Image: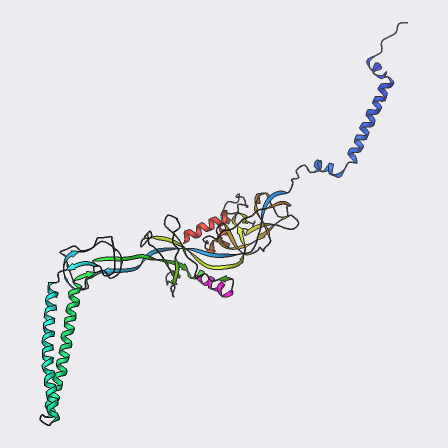
Amino acid sequence: MPTRPHPPFARRLRTTPAALALGALTLAGALLLAGCGDKGAPGAAKPAAAPGAMPPAAVSVLTLRPQDVTLTRELPGRAAPSLVADVRPQVGGLVLARLFTEGSLVRAGQPLYRLDDAPYRSASSSAKAALTKARAAQAAARVNARRAAELVAIDALSKQDNDNAQAALRLADADVQVAQAAVDTAAVNLGRAQIVAPIGGRIGRSFVTPGALVVAGQPTALATILQLDPMHVDVTQSGAELLALRRELVAGSLGATDRLPVTLLLEDGSTYVHKGRLAFSEAAADAATGAVTLRIVVPNPQQWILPGSYVRAVVGNGMRRNALLLPQQALSLDPKGHAAVYVVGADGKAEQRQVMVNRAVGAHWLVDSGLAAGDRVVVEGLQKVHPGAPVQASEVSAAPSAAPAVPASAAPGAAAASAAAAPASAPPATAASAPATASASAAAAR
């Protein structure tokens, strides 16, 4: 009987012993791998369980160290000459000649104008003649008085006649004094016919020309002389700020800086080469503004500073001992709008801390409260930090330099106020944005 072919599934069931052994090994390996996956190390299962975990954020921190800081204040002011003199005639007459060059430097006593002095020469000659006449009368009276004294001694002249002779002598002496005074007055008037410079300095334009008639004490000056070396710079400071500084000086938190030199900033923003000194402050505040005027004296040999020029003076207010300076980029705002910084604790986690700052010193804020010496403040990488998050901190070095101080009002409250007005979508870690805006608004207020 012929053999029928096996169906395909029948052929697959017919296996060799080698195939069976291979299948058994494959099944055992699969079971072993499954068992290893179930009992593997806990670390191997974490990536599958938390695939979004990130390593600690890398940030840069600065360890705060106390230092002595000179607090300065930039005050606006106007330059004024140290001496001003209006040249006016003290006698009347026609102007015969102008003896100076307009805009030049003149010295004290230098002749400036020559007036027609003919009337004054005549008056001087008349006064001298009157003096000669008075002296002649004085000589005669002296002889009569001496003779009368001799005669009354021998009873050859009555006492009444002797008294009259002595009185005539005294009257002649007085007439001589009057005549001498008239001579002196005539000489003074004759000398004033030549007008001289009362002070040394730079003289301006002449308001009269030769041929003009001038009178004594006229309201219009002939010219004006300004002494430009040294120069005075009058600046104003608010009374409230001066009061706060005096309180700090009394409390001992500030050291006096009255003898520190004053730096001037010119209209183009450049620093003036010569240092000034604080001369005095007004004893009274301005009734309208409450500000107090301070006067600064500065050398001006090259006359780069002209009267009326706008300048800014960097004046030292005091020395803060053991102060803490915070880089401006480290300051941010918390959700409530308060000034805050991130501090890295001993456990390596970031902590947000509210701070109070006083004023700007260069690129730093002067810290009043909230931080202590040794705190590690995050200065870079703020956008990657949130409270309680672990961070990988690396130390940076920063050497703050003293610079003109921003007004105290620009730091603590104004920063939060300006930031509160910013859009809510702005990143909270823009460190210097709020303080810089506050400084600009304070500067505009000045």
Q: For the point 79% across and 31% down, which residue is it?
A: 34
Residue 186 in sight from this viewpoint: yes
| Figure quadrant of residue 111 | bottom left
Residue 39 placement, left or right of 275: right
Q: Nearer the viewer, residue 62 or 176?
A: 176
Residue 19: x, y in percent? Answer: 84, 19
Q: Which secondary structure is most common in the magenta stretch?
A: helix
Count of numbered circles in the view: 0
Residue 349: x, y in percent? Answer: 64, 48
Residue 84 placement, left or right of 445: left
Residue 102: x, y in percent? Answer: 22, 53
Residue 26: x, y in percent? Answer: 81, 24
Q: For the point 69% across and 38% down, which residue is it?
A: 50
Residue 292 in sight from this viewpoint: no
Q: Which residues are magenta?
A: 242-252
Q: Is residue 44 magenta?
A: no
Most extreme residue toward the top is 1
Residue 225 placement, left or right of 387: left
Q: For the point 10% across and 74% down, which residue is it?
A: 132
Q: Quadrant of the C terminus?
A: bottom left
Q: Is residue 248 magenta?
A: yes
* Above or below, 168 relative to 355: below
Most extreme residue toward the bottom is 155
